[in-house]
Image: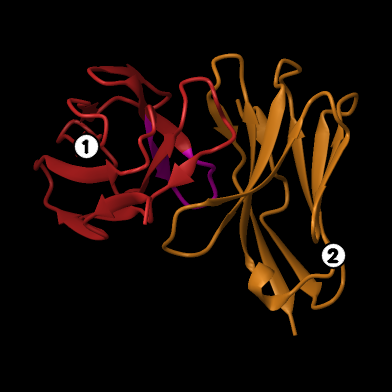
């Protein structure tokens, strides 16, 4: 079964800690994205990558970092510089760099700062 | 500044009736529009889309209408079923092929 796997489903972070959210896809998609969802708001783009070893900042990249060393994997690190990290994080992939028709989403990771 | 707006946070509809979800946008350069459906604690799933060269696209119970002059699109679901209860996101594609998302509308189908 092809799809996107995000782990963990729930994550708790102490203030001042960095945490890494995993996103793996076996769809052979070129493009991958990280979004953040907050109550009453749409999905906001954090980072995206259109090819391996390349990634671009989205609208709210401050306090986050990513890597794209393999086509299948696009991990997101929430650093201590992110002042309000509690949110629902969604990873998505797309078959091509320019296509918008085929976004596939993972089931999300809920991050809570304790 | 929100470029894609869904002004109704929630909508309640009787089962069997028509559900109409609305979306407004401000950027006339958007050329592709999509609707996604999201259940709690899950990622959104693609529902239906429409290109700016069309004014209507239909897929089973779902129809999307686009009014470019009004910068408005709507999703019609008929007849509405209990499984349609979810949050519906409208999204638009910009010139960089990135999706700009609305805030979502929670649809509740009453039995």
Return the residue at label 2: B78
Query: Which chain is home to disc 1?
Result: A
Horizontal arrangement in the rendering, residue A66 relative to residue B109 (left or right) = left
Residue count near mark 1 (Cα–Cα under 10 Å), binned few <14, some 14–19, many ≥20: many
The chain displayed red equals: A
Q: Is residue B79 left or right of residue B83?
A: right
How many numbered marks appear?
2
Q: Is residue A65 magenta?
A: no
Q: Residue at x 38, y 56 (%)?
A: A107
Disc 2/disc 1 C-alpha distance (Å): 40 Å
Residue A69: percent from left, percent from top? 17, 25
Q: Is residue A111 above or below residue A68?
A: below
Q: What residue is shown at x 51% (from left), y 52% (from top)?
A: B44
Q: Give the residue drawn at x 36%, y 57%.
A: A1
User: In which quarter of the view is residue A11 placed?
Assistant: bottom left
Question: Image check: A25 left or right of B101?
Answer: left
What label does residue B52 carry, if any? none
Residue A59 position by quadrant = top left
The residue segment tinted magenta is A32-43
Measured from the top left, where is residue A97 in percent x and y?
46, 21
Display colour scheme: by chain
> In this view of the protein, which residue sits in the foreground, A106 or B108?
A106
Q: Quadrant of the N terminus of chain B?
A: top right
Where in the figure is residue A86, as x and y percent of width and height? 30, 49
What residue is pinned by disc 1?
Answer: A75
Q: Is residue A61 above or below residue B48?
A: above
Q: Position of residue B15 (x, y in %)?
A: 80, 78
**Above or below, comparing residue A80 to residue B76 in the picture:** above
Query: Dot 2 falls on which chain?
Result: B
- Is residue A40 inside the magenta stretch? yes
Q: Colour of chain B?
A: orange
């Amino acid at each position: 079964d092809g799809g996107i796997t995000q782990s963990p489903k729930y994550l708790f972070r102490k203030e001042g800690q960095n945490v890494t959210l995993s996103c793996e896809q076996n769809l052979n998609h070129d493009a991958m994205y990280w979004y953040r969802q907050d109550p009453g708001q749409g999905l906001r783009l954090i980072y995206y990558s259109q090819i391996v070893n390349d990634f671009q900042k989205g609208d709210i990249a401050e306090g986050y970092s990513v890597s794209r060393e393999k086509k299948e994997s696009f991990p997101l690190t929430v650093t201590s510089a992110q002042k309000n990290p509690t949110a629902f994080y969604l990873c998505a992939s797309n078959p091509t760099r320019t296509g918008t028709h085929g976004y596939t989403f993972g089931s999300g990771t809920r991050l809570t700062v304790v | 500044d929100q470029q894609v707006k869904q002004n109704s946070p929630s909508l309640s509809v009787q089962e069997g009736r028509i559900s109409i979800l609305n979306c407004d946008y401000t950027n006339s350069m958007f050329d592709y529009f999509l609707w996604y459906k999201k259940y709690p604690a899950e990622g959104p799933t693609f529902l239906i889309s429409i290109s700016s060269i069309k004014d209507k696209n239909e897929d089973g119970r779902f129809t999307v209408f686009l009014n470019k002059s009004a910068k408005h699109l709507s999703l019609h679901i008929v007849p509405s079923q209990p499984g349609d209860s979810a949050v519906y996101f409208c999204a638009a594609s910009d010139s960089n092929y990135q999706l700009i998302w609305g805030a979502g509308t929670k649809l509740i189908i009453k039995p």
